[in-house]
Image (cartoon, rainbow, N blue to C red):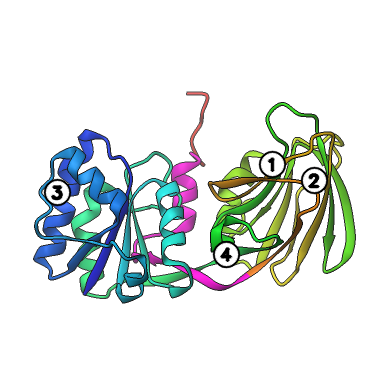
């Protein structure tokens, strides 16, 4: 079996866990490849890399049986871009803080790798959001796992985002920005702006305004079969659009349309994993915060 490891800038205290990960992968018979970012991190930490291969040609990702993301949720979002339409299973090992997506703790690494080797895991399909734009943006990677966002630049005044669903006018959002979130992204930026939590298996998008001028404008859940298009107005000549952590400036002439991507991200789910357990743990549900 072949596995590619992806990760960026590990803290020195995580070095023993990286070493353990490599040792367990080799012991159970994986052929290990690493991205250039992961390789640089190994060199920085002084971890020997004689038994691994550098994935210098990203087209070879199609040969992999699994991609292992080592880092936080942001690193796993990078791994989704790396995999793209190949739909290779992605496992997330968490070295960050919250870890809604990267759910494998460092103490569980050995058990998780044995789960991979023995094929005792299941796969959870996560919907991706796709951006159609004229001109094309994001260097041939017009998709994201969490959300698409339109936002004002810097300290400029609010913008107006005229929004249409399947060609029908919905609303003109006068706000700092607008988020179109997948169910996976409902625990991210959308949540911090007052959006609802949505189960990963739901077939929906969430439209969430960022700091709307009119307080009666609330987040709205729509079918992910919808096509959502926009026209942007504002005093500034430039606006920001983003897919997950990638952003680029545009002007009002750029045509934007959001829809569901034709492929999905396949996340490795160990049998003890539960989305609702993760919510309780990460959001401290059931704890009396007064103590």
**Is 105 positioned to the left or the right of 264 in the image?**
left
Which residue is identified by label 1?
194
Kindly report which numbered mark, 3 or 2, lies closer to the viewer in this rendering: 3
- Tell me whether circle 4 and circle 3 mark residues in contact (CB < 8 Å): no
**Is 105 positioned to the left or the right of 219 in the image?**
left
Q: Which mark is residue 218?
A: 2
Q: Which mark is residue 19?
A: 3
Q: Secondary structure at mark 1?
A: loop
Q: Residues within 10 Å of mark 4 (few under 14, many from 20)?
A: many
119 or 38, nearer to the observer: 38
Kindly report which numbered mark, 1 or 3, lies closer to the viewer in this rendering: 3
Q: CA distance from mark 1 to mark 3?
A: 41 Å
Mark 3 / mark 2, whichever is N-terminal:
3
- Tell me whether circle 1 and circle 4 mark residues in contact (CB < 8 Å): no
Residue occupying the point 60% across, 43% down: 189
Q: CA distance from mark 4 to mark 3?
A: 33 Å
Q: Residues within 10 Å of mark 1 (few under 14, many from 20)?
A: some
Q: Quadrant of residue 28?
A: bottom left
* Residue 265, magenta (yes or no): yes
């Amino acid at each position: 079996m072949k596995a590619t490891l992806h990760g960026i800038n590990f803290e020195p205290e995580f070095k023993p866990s990286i070493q353990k990960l490599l040792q367990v992968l080799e012991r159970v018979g994986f052929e290990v490849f690493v991205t250039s970012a992961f390789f640089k991190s190994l060199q920085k930490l002084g971890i020997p890399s004689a038994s691994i291969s550098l994935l210098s040609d990203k087209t070879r990702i199609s040969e992999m049986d699994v991609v292992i993301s080592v880092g936080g949720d942001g690193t796993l979002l990078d791994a989704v871009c790396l995999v793209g339409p190949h739909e290779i299973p992605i496992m997330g090992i968490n070295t960050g803080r919250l870890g809604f997506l990267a759910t494998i703790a460092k103490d569980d690494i050995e058990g998780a790798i044995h789960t991979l080797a023995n094929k005792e895991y299941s796969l959870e399909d996560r919907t991706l959001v796709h951006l159609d734009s004229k001109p094309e943006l994001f260097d041939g990677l017009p998709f994201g796992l969490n959300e698409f966002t339109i936002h004002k630049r810097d300290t400029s005044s609010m913008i107006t985002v005229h929004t249409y669903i399947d060609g029908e006018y919905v609303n003109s959002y006068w706000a700092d920005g607008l988020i179109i979130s997948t169910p996976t992204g409902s625990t991210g930026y959308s949540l911090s702006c007052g959006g609802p939590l949505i189960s990963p298996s739901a077939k929906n998008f969430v439209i969430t305004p960022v700091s709307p001028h009119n307080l009666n404008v609330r987040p709205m859940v729509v079918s992910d079969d919808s096509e959502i298009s926009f026209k942007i107005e504002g005093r500034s000549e430039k606006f920001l659009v983003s897919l997950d952590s990638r952003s680029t400036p545009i002007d009002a002439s750029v045509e934007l349309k959001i829809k569901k991507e034709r492929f999905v991200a396949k996340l490795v789910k160990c049998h003890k994993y539960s989305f609702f357990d993760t919510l309780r743990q990460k959001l401290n549900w059931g704890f009396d915060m007064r103590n």
